[in-house]
Amino acid sequence: MIPHNTLGYLPETPSQTAGPYVHIGLIPKQAGFDIFENNLGETLLGPDTQGERIRIEGRIFDGTGALVRDALVEIWQADTHGRFNHPADRQDGPRDETFRGWGRTGTDFESGLWCFETIKPGRIAGRSGHHRMAPHINVWIVSRGINLGLATRLYFGDEATANAEDPVLRVIEQPDRRKTLIASHALREGRPVYTFDIRLQGEGETVFFDV
Amino acid sequence: MTADSEFVARDPAAHPPALTPIYKTSVFRAPHRPLLSLQNSLSEVTGPAFGQHELGPLDNDLVHNYAKADGAPIGERIIVHGRVLDGSARPVSGVLVEFWQANAAGRYRHRNDNYDAPIDPNFGGCGRCLTDAEGRYAFRTVKPGPYPYRNRVNDWRPAHIHFSVFGSGFAQRLITQMYFEGDPLIRHDSILQTVTDPAAQERLVALLDLNASVPLHTLAYRWDIVLRGTRSTLFENRLQGN
């Protein structure tokens, strides 16, 4: 069934759009029904989660400037110490064992808003010979009309020094395009909120990565 | 995966391009600028892991996981099974596989689906499981029906099941769709045709697997999923911590 190409490697399974009803499988409550006892990715925070609690939120716009109100957004991030909850992270130092660092949600069918309550991650080791990466959250978007999930990163607007050293931001040739990855910082009722709007196409198009 | 391996680059020829005018919704949702190619960092080689304790006992049985006590979904009962492998043909074990689909009449249990076909009171249409040590997954369901959708005036989706798969690292994340061998709508499907390579299209089609069927009860289909492989033992540009 899987044809072998040269050298015995298997070719990848192609991606297909998640479609308009992605909610059914991944966030069924938004589709309008309750089926699983445990809805994965609903909350990132537990009572013992270490670090500064923040809210990140934003909207997604298509090439006409219209809201994308049927997208699924997933995030993957390090803990407050800059450690990922994964065996491939062999950085030294403490790790918050209570923090998985992964969440998923849908853009709201009316407002188009997505949001997560999480913690601000620490700085993370870069590839060997590179600066440490600035605190960031990996963002992955799928929806109707998106044929292959789009990967981007949310960086923090109040981390100018770390952002200036970040080896990934520095790979972006045009300084103006780097700004598309910087979430703006504000306080709402005393709590930090970072706003990260994503533009799929056209003016101000968000930088997406082939990772 | 260990810290001294990273993923081989995604093969763009295996996937649909972002802009596929045959599937009209893609036209305003496709980035116009090229993706920025990044070498893997810890952000890409790591990813979430899930445990069996997070899943319910009926999560991989769509015939029963939404059925009322004395009810059962209408439709052709099937088993769908296969393996999740990486590009080096190694099993990807312990990863979360999620699936969702229309009911046998082609109707989704979703507040935005208003297709004129009945909702099945005994069918939710979603499930999930973890792959075993050999990368195997399996679930029971009813075969979904085809349905029309707004693209061209008379576009119909072939019967299909949506799949979401995690690998060991977030860069392997994949969402796709599985089709059924012999479905005459396959060759008319605009969404399958966003994949331009016919051989790649074939890789999305499950084959009837009589050997895995339950005699006098349930037919089976087999479909394997291949995620990007890893490249190990780096001599240069080693990830931090090696």
Image (spheres, grey):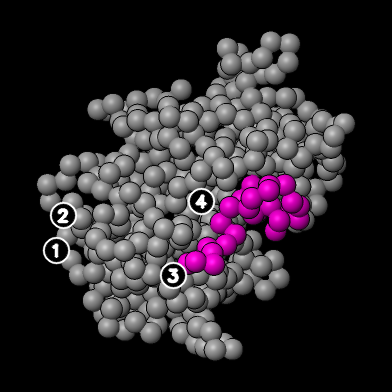
Report the Cα–Cα distance between label 4 and label 1.
35 Å
Mark 4 on the same chain as mark 3: yes
**In the image, residue A109 above or below residue B222:** below
Q: Mark 1 points at which residue?
A: A129
Circle 3/circle 2 CB separation < 8 Å:
no
Q: Position of residue B126 (x, y in %)?
A: 67, 42
Question: The residue under label 3 is which amino acid type?
Answer: Gln
Report the Cα–Cα distance between label 1 and label 2.
8 Å
**In the image, residue A149 above or below residue B185:** below
Question: The residue under label 1 is which amino acid type?
Answer: Gly
Q: Name the residue under label 4.
A: A147
Any mark on residue A50, and which? 3
**In the image, residue B172 above or below residue B132:** below
**Residue located 69% across and 66% down the image:** A109
Report the Cα–Cα distance between label 3 and label 2.
32 Å
Mark found first going from the N terminus, 3 or 1:
3
Circle 1/circle 2 CB separation < 8 Å:
yes
Which stretch appears magenta?
A22-50
Q: Give the chain of mark 1.
A: A
